[in-house]
Image (cartoon, rainbow, N blue to C red):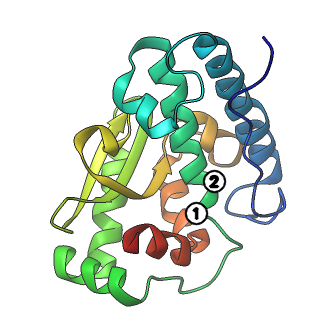
């Protein structure tokens, strides 16, 4: 292979910046091993194909099989890792996104409860997402394996990873506890920017 089209994203924070919600050890495995593997796999699978050099979103919407699985995991993980910041007490959205959450779910607490339930009840591996439809209405979806809401014509805003590698070192089999803790580290500025884009 002459060159790598896709590269491992750089984290916008130190590996220990999300502790105690997500440990540096989990970040090391999740970002440094799992995501790195998807990047390497996608470079190998797309080399010399029409997908080489294509935008990730386009690959996810147009491919299937191994290419889709690896491209989807990269897209999902890049959105996931980019949306976090150091833990904050009483962390909540503001502005237009906060208004939309209130409008579509009744309250931020009601939204959190519904989002956590969707993440906790997703069988097997996958992701829970907050997205906006074409009319701007907010929806929560469960996506299995490497799927992404863009495949449904939605604009993805926020995601929690419910693959075991995202939480098992820190929470063992307590997925609901992991989901409940993640609200402390959501960078709502990033999510707001996605909503406004």
Q: Secondary structure at mark 2?
A: helix
Q: Which residue is mark 1?
A: 83
In the rendered view, would you say 64 is above or below 74?
above
Q: Which residue is mark 2?
A: 81
Quadrant into which the C terminus falls:
bottom left
Q: Name the side, left or right, on which 81 lies relative to 59.
A: right
Tell which of 3 and 86 is nearer to you.
3
Q: Secondary structure at mark 1?
A: loop
Which residue shows up at 45% across the image and 29% down it? 59
Count up the numbered dots. 2
Q: Say whether residue 150 is visible.
A: yes
> Which label belongs to residue 190?
none
Q: Name the side, left or right, on which 111 lies relative to 25.
A: left
Q: Residue 43: percent from the left, percent from the top? A: 67, 20
Q: Residue 74: percent from the left, percent from the top? A: 58, 36
Q: Say whether residue 122 is visible.
A: no
In the rendered view, would you say 188 is above or below 141?
below
State the image quarter where residue 33 is shown: top right
In the rendered view, would you say 158 is above or below 97?
above
Which residue shows up at 58% across the image and 63% down it? 83
Q: Residue 16: percent from the left, percent from the top? A: 83, 60
Which residue shows up at 18% across the image and 74% down it? 104
State the image quarter where residue 62 is shown: top left
State the image quarter where residue 123 is shown: top left
Task: Tell me, yes or no, whether the two marked residues, 1 and 2, touch with CB atoms within 8 Å.
Answer: yes
């Amino acid at each position: 292979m002459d060159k790598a089209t896709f590269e491992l994203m750089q984290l916008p924070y130190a590996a220990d910046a999300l502790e105690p919600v997500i440990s540096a050890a989990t970040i090391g495995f999740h970002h440094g091993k799992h995501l790195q593997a998807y990047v390497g796999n996608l470079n190998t699978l797309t080399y010399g194909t029409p997908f080489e050099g294509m935008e990730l979103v386009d690959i996810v919407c147009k491919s299937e099989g191994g290419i889709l699985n690896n491209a989807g995991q990269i897209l999902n993980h890049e959105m996931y890792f980019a949306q976090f910041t150091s833990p904050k007490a009483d962390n909540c959205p503001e502005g237009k996104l906060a208004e939309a959450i209130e409008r579509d779910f009744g309250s931020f607490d009601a939204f959190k409860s519904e989002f956590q339930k969707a993440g906790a009840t997703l069988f097997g591996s996958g992701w829970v997402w907050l997205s906006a439809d074409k009319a701007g209405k907010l929806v929560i979806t469960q996506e299995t394996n490497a799927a992404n809401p863009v495949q449904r014509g939605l604009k993805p805003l926020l995601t929690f990873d419910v693959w075991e590698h995202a939480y098992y070192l820190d929470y063992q089999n307590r997925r609901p506890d992991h989901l409940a803790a993640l609200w402390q580290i959501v960078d709502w500025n990033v999510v707001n920017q996605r909503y406004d884009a």
